[in-house]
Amino acid sequence: MGGEILVPQPTGNTREFWEGCKGKKLLFQQCEACGHVRWPPSNLCPVCHSLEARWIDSSGRGRIYTFTVYHVAFHPAWKDKVPYVTAVVELEEGPRFLSNIVDADPRTLSIGMPVEVVWEEAGEYFVPRFRPVG
Ligand SMILES: [Zn+2]
């Protein structure tokens, strides 16, 4: 690690999510009407259009849905981290979440691999990343 730290800038519907991250909680909205767990946060359930939702605390466990390995840093904050892995993780609760896979050799990763959340400090927040389980 090293270089600049990117600090989250919460807006609108993401404020509650980032408040959770201050306490290392991975929060998703769950529809009160149909139970669908969604990401990103929104006012309306994309399945049943209900406006009623609560925030649930995710297990932080999931699987790699897809990933790519970056060999060029597209932001100065990442220059000391190449090669780094950007992945879509499908959480146990259902949402597909864009993040990074850390603590792993990119060559050992595969689609469907079980992963768990790890927290990277960024100012007053902790940013969710994922690492392979076991
Ligand atoms: Zn719904």
Image (tube, helix red, strand yellow):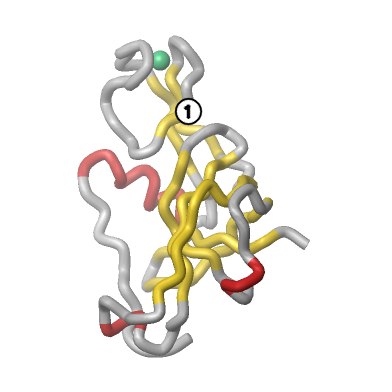
Left or right: residue 78 compared with residue 92: left
Residue found 30% across the figure and 45% down from its top: 14
In this rendering, is residue 131 above or below 93?
below
Residue at the image position 26 percent from the left and 26 percent from the top? 43
Q: Which residue is mark 1?
A: 37
Q: Residue furthest left?
A: 12
Q: Quadrant of residue 48?
A: top left
Tell me the residue at 62%/76% (across/down).
105
Could you tell me if residue 22 is visible in this image? no
Where residue 132 appears, as percent x and y from the top left, is 67, 61
Label 1 CB sits under 8 Å from any ligand 1 atom: no
Name the secondary structure under disc 1: strand
| Residue 100 x, y percent position in the rendering | 47, 63
Between 30 and 101, the one nearer to me in the picture: 101
Crowdedness of circle 1 by 10 Å Cα count: few (<14), some, many (20+)?
many
Q: Is residue 39 above or below residue 109?
A: above
Residue 41 falls in image quadrant: top left
Q: In the image, is 82 to the left or to the right of 116?
A: left
**In the depicted view, which residue is nearer to us: 64 or 62?**
64
Amino acid type at mark 1: Val
* Residue at 40% across, 72% down: 122
Say above or below: 97 vs 133: above
